[in-house]
Image (cartoon, grey):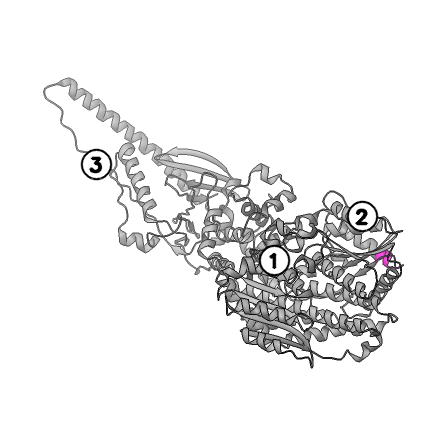
Amino acid sequence: MKRGRRNVGMQKKKKKKASESADYEPTLPVSEKSNPLTRDMDRASACSIVKMLQACDAQMFQEKSQTEYQVQELNWLGLLSDEIVKTLMEVAERVRLILKDPQDSLVVLSGCGTSGRLAFFMASGFNRELQRLNYAPICSYVIAGGDRALFSSQEAPEDDPTLGALRLKKVSGGKKRVLFIGVSCGLSAPFVAGQLDFCLRHPDVYTPVLVGFNPAHQARNEPLPGCMLTFHSVVTRIEELAKTQKAFLINPALGPEAISGSSRMKGGSATKILLEVVFSASFSRTPITFNGILQHMRSYKKALDFTYSHSEGIAALTEAAGRSLQCGRQVCYLGWGSLGLLGLIDASECKPTFGADYEDIRGFVSGGYKELGNNEGDLTLMGPEFSISHDDFLDRVLPRLTDDDTVLLLYSDSDDVDEVAKLARRVREKTSNIHAAYHQTDGATAAQHDDINKLCSSTINFTWPQETPKRLQYMVRLLIYSLLYRKLLRELSTKLLLNAVSTGAHTLKGKVFKNYMIDLQVTNSKLYRRATRLLQELSGHSESQCEEALLKAIYQVDKLSEDIMTCSLKTHTHTAGKAKKVVPLALVCLLTGCSIKEAETRLEQQPIVREAVEACKSMSTSSIEPGWDSTEVLSWRSPVEPIRQRWRRRDAYYRQSLRRPPLRPPSRTQRDSHLGSADAPTFPCIISSASVGSPLVADVSSSDSASWSPVVASFTVSLSLSSSSSSPVPASPSSLLIFSTILLSFLFSISTLLIFLLLFLLVFLRRLFLLSRFRHRGRRQWAFLELKDLKEVKFHHHRSFGSQWVLLERPGGHFLADTSFAGAVFIVASL
């Protein structure tokens, strides 16, 4: 935290040079990198956003992963590579073995956040399909945080490897053969690492399968909380066992996410594709072959292309959702069956990703918890955000709907279309902003579809081909498999649609800066590190400065106490979970040097985080014309009243102590031309660019430390001190005693004046000596770096002639300052 700080100007030059390279974040894992395809997403229209997302999603199916993200020394594999397909075949064979012995065997899917929600979604979905095929259910799921994490952010348990192992042991107790599939997109979740380690320590029962989307050497290499184990060491052990098929690693290349670090998008889609291919192949009554697996994988690529062929409709829906969020209203997904569950999952991910309120985007499913089939049952009593049924929507949300809200219907031809039409009519009575996305098989017709279309502002009709691809015909021995195949493709299409709508809507609202989720919640160690890196990228400051600013924003303080500095990371993330706009607050403080309260005021005045950050960045990086020696003043200008008070205090001081004429305050014209209007928001900060005669001023009104900020305008302070002349006082001829007293007083005054003049001469000569050693330090950026944090310097005070002289000592040098002016520090010289 107290590391040496580098020059800001040099940092920005290095950062700019790095950003212009092909891989400008070489030290980050691929899942945390920024995708160049979406670098300008925050400035794009809804139509352009959809096209960017399409280009990013298409990277999942690149035949050869020879991209700029590939580590050159490693032949990293793509989703359709031969090695990945062969690994999927081997895992599918293990699932088929478990199907033959469901009594003593089990498949456990586990993950955190999006991965855990998809683990639940697929485990419950395939259990239903097994029951339709008259098989016993063999799948179970584990999600960090329990079933509450299905609908709300419960990311703190992700950092507990011991809890993960205990949950796995509990769910698989009594089974003789367990296939554990742990999903961690970034190969970083301690919860999953603890489960994998537990499997590796009990190889007679557990066979671990790790699914992720980073190279193995980029797995998290930090000790897990409570132990010396690292995720990297776990991956290394799995790689060794994979050679003998005692463990499996599936980590294809996907490229960076469209929103940096948002694994709910490509990471979630690829997880769904990989596991569905494994289960579908194992459920079929045909041999598991390489071509069968490969063709099934390629069918998902066709589904992706088919989905984005409706990009105009998706863009229109995204724009409508964006307008609702901009107005402070909400977006509601009303779904049926598995499509409704995908709506629940997409809505629950918006809060941790974009710092949104749970009411901004909500999902509701027909049947509620009966359709969900989760382990812990009905959770409605836990709070309003756990109300997920259509009845809950009708009771709690529908009465408050307006035309500014957006409602999206999600259904297919296999759902009860009459029920859909009935609900659509009730919603249409409250709002005209209703839309629909439905799936049907080519040739299927329903009169109710036309009625629903008339009620909706827009509809997206996904009409799928009726026949199954020829190369999959040999796998289709049962009608149920053909229906399952169609269902899986429709689910992926719906997921891509919902990801585009929620991501695009929050981008249009201003929750994204470039392609970074700037308003993310810092609720676990992974997000804590991500927030620190994001502050580094956007501010150009060092890691220690960014972490310090982040902690100040978390604890809402301007100075970190010793207690805060010694708190554990778990305490930091727990406190951050209760705070709002932590990263934007920290970024504004870094860019302006202002206090937390001032940063909150700035964000309240400009609630769109993107525009507030850009305003601060433009202020902090505004260039100064060469040759300027004048003082420069920041846009945080002082109001008129503090100026008046300052001159009044100096007036009183000279009247009482030095007996000199009062200094006249500047005229209204001069004041307004230099400091702006009277309603300027905060306090003055004046920084000299280079010249000796120009003072450097900082706001030291705070008792903790001075507040330094970048500068944008010119202001010159000149003081004219004129000594008063006194006329002789005639002696009284009536009294010699009075005359003697006056004479002695006069002589005493003369001697006192001579002493003052001698002291003044000595101080003046000393000042000349100091000024002769003044060294030119360059531009404003140096002054901002060297002087903005006075808590690291030592003060040596000396009073003389009404001046408070301060010698500032720090490793970078010594500075002489005059603090006699109220609320300001005048830097005299640098030694």
Q: Which residue is mark 1?
A: 353
Whether 725 is among the magenta residues is no
Decide if residue 290 is on the left or right side of residue 673: right
The answer to the question of whether label 3 and label 2 lie on touching residues, with beta carbons closer than 8 A, is no
Identified by mark 1, the residue type is: Thr
**Element marked by disc 1:** helix
Q: Residue 9 — which label?
A: none
Question: Horizontal and vertical percent for residue 755?
Answer: 32, 29
Q: Earlier in the sequence, mark 1 or mark 3?
A: 1
User: Does the rendering let one see residue 775?
Assistant: yes
**Element marked by disc 2:** helix
Residue 450 picture quarter: bottom right
Residue at 72% x, 71% y is 489
User: Does the rendering let one see residue 595?
Assistant: no
The answer to the question of whether label 1 and label 3 lie on touching residues, with beta carbons closer than 8 A, is no
Residue 305 picture quarter: bottom right
Question: Horizontal and vertical percent for residue 604?
Answer: 46, 54
Identified by mark 2, the residue type is: Lys
Residue range (magenta): 239-247
Residue placed most toward the observer, 667 or 793:
667
Q: Earlier in the sequence, mark 3 or mark 2?
A: 2
Question: Horizontal and vertical percent for residue 529?
Answer: 64, 51
Q: Residue 169 — which label?
A: 2
Decide if residue 483 is on the left or right side of residue 750: right
Give the Cα distance between marks 3 and 2.
94 Å
Q: Which residue is mark 3?
A: 725
Whether 241 is among the magenta residues is yes
Identified by mark 3, the residue type is: Ser
